[in-house]
Amino acid sequence: MTRSSSDDSLGLLAKLRGQEVDALELKMRRKAQLEQRYRNTIHALTELCQRPQPIAAHPALAINAGQYKGALLSVLEDQKRDLALHEMDMAADRQILLAAYRKQVGLEQVIDQRRRQEHLERSRREQKRTDDLAAQRSSTRRV
């Protein structure tokens, strides 16, 4: 593999890694939005559960109010459980995103190192060419 094709391959790999990181960041933003929706729902359900219930004039209304509150508490617990699972999923995805960042940064460091090396080699070749020309001029002046 020539140096140019190797550089092209590294460039393509860096682009793909960047796209992977972008996709993972988008996924995390969406999950953060979902997390906020869970929290808002939990807050709203908690407020509904804490509201004082009016005293029912009829026993059927009292039973209905009790069942309503029981249903709210059940949904509230489901939402809390779903939020906890979602948070665990987000923590795992954060680790995946962090690993992708590390890979991307490592690859960028390799690419930067290669660029610096190429620049150094070009500078050395240019200096050698300049030194050779100076030596050639010096030798032609002596003659």
Image (cartoon, grey):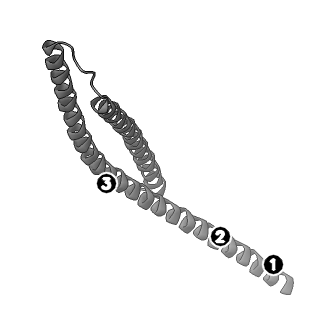
> Disc 3 to disc 1, how far (Cα)?
63 Å
Task: Give the number of the mark in front: 2 or 1.
Answer: 2
Q: Residue furthest bottom?
A: 142
The type of residue carrying mark 2 is Ser
User: Residue 76 sits in which quadrant?
Assistant: top left
Q: Are marks 2 and 3 in contact (CB under 8 Å)?
A: no
Q: Height in image: 8 above or below 72?
A: below
The type of residue carrying mark 3 is Gln
Q: Are marks 2 and 1 in contact (CB under 8 Å)?
A: no
Asked whether the viewer can see residue 143, the reply is no
x, y (%) of residue 143?
Answer: 84, 85
The type of residue carrying mark 1 is Arg
Q: Disc 3 marks which residue?
A: 95
> Disc 2 to disc 1, how far (Cα)?
21 Å
- Label 1 crowding class (10 Å Cα cut-off): few <14, some 14-19, many 20+? few
User: Residue 51 sits in which quadrant?
Assistant: top left
Residue at screen point 84% across, 87% down: 142
x, y (%) of residue 139?
Answer: 79, 83
Residue at screen point 16% across, 24% down: 66
Residue situated in front as seen by the camera: 69 or 100 = 69
Q: Disc 2 marks which residue?
A: 123
Left or right: residue 94 compared with residue 137: left
Task: Give the number of the mark in front: 3 or 1.
Answer: 3
x, y (%) of residue 39?
Answer: 34, 37
User: In the image, which disc is placed on residue 114?
Assistant: none
User: Residue 74 sits in which quadrant?
Assistant: top left
Residue at screen point 40% across, 54% down: 101
Q: Height in image: 104 above or below 121?
A: above
- Label 3 crowding class (10 Å Cα cut-off): few <14, some 14-19, many 20+? few
User: In the image, which disc is placed on residue 137?
Assistant: 1
Residue at screen point 58% across, 69% down: 121
Lower sequence index among marks 2 and 1: 2
